[in-house]
Amino acid sequence: MSCTKRFPLAKARLEEIVKTYPTPFYLYDERSIVENAARFKKAFSALPFFKEHFAVKASPNPAILKILAREGFGADCSSLPELLLSGMAGITGEDIMFTSNETPIAEYRKALELGAVINLDDFTHIEFLEKYARIPELVSCRYNPGDRKTGNAIIGTPKEAKYGFTREQILEGFRLLKQKGAKRLALHTMVASNELNVEYHIETARLLFELAVEVREKTGVRLEFVNLGGGVGIPYLPEQTAVDYETLASGVKAAYDAIIVPAGLDPLGIRAEWGRAITGPYGWLVSRAVHRKSVYREYIALDSCMADLMRPGLYGAYHHITVAGKEDAPLTETYDVVGGLCENNDKFAVQRKLPRIATANDSGVANGGDLVVIHDAGAHGRAMGFNYNGKLRCGELLLRPDGSILQIRRRETIEDYFATLTMDAVESL
Ligand SMILES: *Cc1c(COP(=O)(O)O)cnc(C)c1O
């Protein structure tokens, strides 16, 4: 079985890059990200005032944000540092959607100062904003449809999710916001994560459109836009199929024509805040195989670990793995591919069929094992990294369209790891 999942570099070029940037590292393919962004934009261009706010948490690097900003993307932020990252990429004002939750006042104040679109996560935040900051001209509210929508594995069922307003609170919230001086109002939802079913996303749009009509009827508020959120999945498994943007966009357009147009609410702006589907398939974690261990199972140990990519350990998520130069080799072995964290769920793959992988001992060089590529790590990958066990997070490289490599984040150093320690306190003890 040869795999359809691609990695943009041949083994020889990768070995050359590793001389300058030792493994492990993340590699992102700029050309593929731009092409994907352009396809996405084209498909959704039929929708009125369509705007994508890339979810910064998926890939919080200003270089990636800048590449996307050039394609007309804004940003979706949920913390103060994410607001600042967007600014570093030149994304400002209403191109930023501030979809935070449990938000402290300092973060609301910063978002207001930047002129970002404030997307309230709770009814009580109307009073909170008014008391401790101010109600801006444009306010969006996040809707939690509860029983009206089933959820999925990563985000849970909406009824059990901590996010958003109930339907009654949405209606009351828009009345209150209008009364308190908000002039422009918008509606948002985010009900799924990594969902590949197109119909699921179209139904979310339908739900928001119907609510927009109800808001108009019951409160007199004519919404400026609805934000469909993110949560569009990517085919992590080789046998899965990617969401077809045209099918999704034309389904949303059909719902718009059936619900919004007859209600006299056209034009209603449409926004989205996809993260995973925009960069996920175009980023890889590149590591080297260090050891092979034969006990009750066969293990391959990499020089990266769960602290670099936690999705497999956290959710049991599948990430495809290939070996540089052995892309078409027969899958003769069954390995658990693991990292060096003192946690037994530090496994990138469990009982995975792979070609025979050469380790340091096989090669006769301490750093001579095979280069192992973990696919679909371009979103919620490096971003979810952590420092447990004193693991230093790896850096990020960008493969430019001309084939050159640009380092967009260096790897962490021991100095970074120690930077927050107060050694004066330690010495005073
Ligand atoms: C995480 C998140 C997104 C992006 O989700 P993806 O699954 O990466 O598309 C968008 N909006 C909100 C509010 C989120 O929390």
Image (cartoon, rainbow, N blue to C red):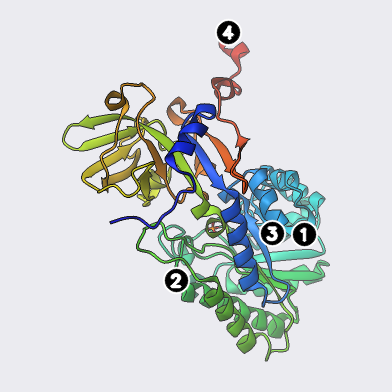
For disc 1, the neighbor class at 10 Å (few under 14, some 14 to 19, many from 20) is some
Residue at image location 58% in from the left, 8% down from the top: 427
Pinpoint residue 121: horizontal percent, then vertical percent: 63, 59
- In what quadrant of the picture does the C terminus appear? top right
Which of pointers 4 and 1 indicates the residue nearer the eye?
Answer: 1
> Is the residue marked 4 within 8 Å of ligand 1, measured from its CB?
no
Work out whether mark 4 precedes mark 1 in sequence or the reverse, and give the earlier one. 1
- Between residue 327 and residue 242, name the one nearer to us: 327
Report, in whole angstroms, how far the alpha carbon at label 3 lies from the one at label 2. 24 Å
Is residue 107 among what the camera can see? yes
Pinpoint residue 162: horizontal percent, then vertical percent: 52, 58
Q: Residue furthest bottom?
A: 262
Q: Quadrant of residue 369?
A: top left
Per the image, label 4 sits on a secondary structure element best described as helix
Residue at image location 42% in from the left, 33% down from the top: 304
- Judging by the rendered image, the residue that carries numbered circle 1 is 94
> Is the residue marked 1 within 8 Å of ligand 1, measured from its CB?
no
Report, in whole angstroms, how far the alpha carbon at label 2 lies from the one at label 4. 58 Å
- Judging by the rendered image, the residue that carries numbered circle 4 is 427
Per the image, label 2 sits on a secondary structure element best described as loop
Per the image, label 3 sits on a secondary structure element best described as loop
- Judging by the rendered image, the residue that carries numbered circle 2 is 197
- Between residue 164 and residue 94, name the one nearer to us: 94
Work out whether mark 3 precedes mark 2 in sequence or the reverse, and give the earlier one. 3
For disc 2, the neighbor class at 10 Å (few under 14, some 14 to 19, many from 20) is some
Q: Is residue 141 left or right of residue 355?
A: right
Residue 169 sits above or below residue 93 on the image: below
